[in-house]
Amino acid sequence: MTEIDVKPFTYALALGLATAQLAFPALAADITGAGATFPFPVYSKWAEAYRKDTGTGLNYQSIGSGGGIKQIQAKTVDFGATDAPLKGPALEKDGLVQFPTVMGGVVAVVNIPGIEPGKLKLTGDVIADIYANKITKWSDPKIAALNDGLKLPDANITPVYRSDASGTTNIFTTYLSQVSEGWKKEFGAATTVSWPAGQGGKGNEGVTATVKQVPNAIGYVESAYAKQNKLSYALIRNKAGKFPQPDDKAFQAAAASADWKSQPGFGITLTDQAGEDAWPITAATFILVHKEAADPAKSADVLKFFDWAYKNGDKLASDLDYVPLPDAVVGLIHEEWKQVKGKDGKPVLGM
């Protein structure tokens, strides 16, 4: 993992790199975390503001969900971050507490000369066929039928995918499995799959950089990466047959009827939800901490950081097109935090 020290944090530079780490000069009280690239833009903004407010810094390695899970299991970081929530048995096995921080959307980004953001329309089954190497040109009749009047080149499509174990890939392939039986049978949903064609990039940052560099490419990234890097994106037809814009309104619509307590650790699926305004590839991102705190003070610092973010970080999240969690869900998370205890059996953070 390439590290970049950020003081002050240079946002555009960080997102343009194939790999990234949010880092401040280490102090004794600094928090360490690693994992998902999906929330990296908002965690970086929260970290800047939190340091100004409290003096406590955050060292966050944006290495992908798989890496974050491994590091928290190995107890080499104070928290892990994943976009692919762990199931109940996995949480129990490793003694972990899991909770969401924000919601956001995965978007299909493209680099087609002359195609402006939001002009290209796609469906889930067409995207599945592109990544399955069954649709190989932008002039394919299935794409043309969705884009009457849009001039598309007779050029080969280069699918760009995550080369690392990725929660974003899990979200993306979960959606493809919901809308395409062929994809479900051949590839399925996972943090890594056997891609039949295209190029890989490490992290959302790597996919972003590759799509920008390769003409006629298509990739999937968290919406903030598309926005901050001014990438062209496609509209995707939702379950109601509409083509909403990938913005906070559409992400909120997808989460409108979510039952957060239906799964252990709040591990619900928000993809392919009903509703005319719902963005079809919406998801939450999650934090992992140990129930039994080896260092109660440091575990308390982690929870204090995210408690500050819930109370003070909504605008910073919204500015990046993430959706803050409803207050009722934050209340449930506070209850969940009571499981994080020191060796004396007392919660590390009094709420």
Image (cartoon, rainbow, N blue to C red):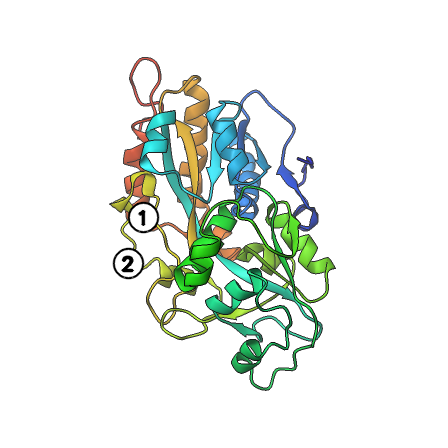
Residue visible at 51% across and 69% down in the picture = 126
Please give the label number shown on residue 257: 2
Q: Nearer the viewer, residue 56 or 251?
A: 251
Q: Which of the 4 image quarters holds residue 231? A: bottom right
- Label 2 – label 1 distance at C-alpha: 15 Å
Residue 188 versus residue 121 in the image, above or below: above
- Residue 22 shown left or right of residue 182 in the figure: right
Residue 127 versus residue 48 in the image, above or below: below
Q: Nearer the viewer, residue 341 or 185?
A: 185
Residue visible at 60% across and 76% down in the picture = 140
Residue visible at 64% across and 77% down in the picture = 139
Of badges 2 and 1, the one in the foreground is 2
Find disc 1 in the rendering and name its residue. Answer: 327
Q: Could you tell me residue 2's position as x and y percent?
A: 69, 36
Report helix, strand or loop for mark 2.
loop
Report helix, strand or loop for mark 1.
helix
Res 224 visible: yes
Q: Which of the 4 image quarters holds residue 273? A: bottom left
Q: Could you tell me residue 248's position as x and y percent?
A: 45, 61
Identity, as a three-letter code, of the amino acid under mark 2: Ser
Which quadrant does the C terminus fall into? top left
- Residue 327 shown left or right of residue 107 in the figure: left
Identity, as a three-letter code, of the amino acid under mark 1: Asp
